[in-house]
Image (cartoon, rainbow, N blue to C red):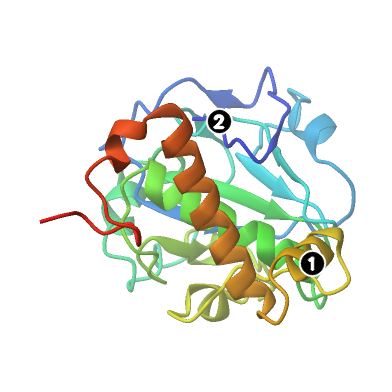
Amino acid sequence: MKYEKALWRPITTNHRKGRTRGAATVQAFVCHSQEGYGSLFTLFNNPARRASTHFWIAKTGQVEQYVDTADTAWGNGERNRSGGPDARIPWAAAAYAAAAVNDVTVSCELEGRAGEPMTPEQKTAALLLLRWVHERHGLGQPVRHLTVVEHNQLSATACPSSRWPIDELLAPSAEIPVPPGSEVAAALAFWYPGLPADSALARFINQTILNDINQFAPSLLADRGPGGEVAA
């Protein structure tokens, strides 16, 4: 699947069509850290590298997608972690034994180096991407150590160097942040004066959905009251 908010930059090597090993069903989203700067397209498109991830998130919040999530990226290594995968991940032992860790995961790199926190723009992009992957692959609610894991829980590496604030991103109260001073924030403040940015964004999204339904499928609203409730 292709993420509509990402820049589609398909690589021609270093991945496998489909998900052909083990259960061949996506089980989790794996967090990585680039340990560097700039797009990873050229690196991942080099056949000598033999590595890739599905996504990369720039410090600006731009997302690039290199591999369709229906296919297998080569981001997590296979059977190289002493003692096996983190025992808190219930699906990992079987995937590890079958050398199928890559086949059951969607992976994402984060621009930057160890010690550098996510930028606000990266947090926004990561939250949206996490939700999209979980929705499109039927993973349900994101849960740490189940559907959201770190690379070091599967392979012998320090990656992602504690750079993903996973608990913060998965908190029940987590809202999609709107960077203060951005053009988006300014537009929301104009149309919804007095509302916090996250509430204004939620209202904008809801109204956009209702407008689309009214334009393209008005029959869906025919039996609804003035507040959108279904008539008895």
Query: Where is residue 114 shown, x and y percent of the image?
Result: 79, 72
Query: Considering depth in this image, is 224 or 87 the residue closer to the camera?
Result: 224
Residue behind mark 1? 190
Mark 1 secondary-structure assignment: helix
Query: Where is residue 37 shown, x and y percent of the image?
Result: 89, 53
Give the residue type that dot 1 points to: Phe
Q: Is residue 221 above or below residue 85?
A: above
Task: Calculate the distance from the C-alpha at mark 2 to the C-alpha at mark 1.
Answer: 33 Å
In the image, is 183 to the left or to the right of 196? right
Q: In which quarter of the image is residue 3?
A: top right
Residue positioned 48% across, 20% down in the render:
17
Residue behind mark 2? 2
Q: Is residue 150 above or below residue 8?
A: below
Residue positioned 40% across, 42% down in the render:
136
In the image, is 50 to the left or to the right of 27? right
Query: Where is residue 197 shown, x and y percent of the image?
Result: 69, 74
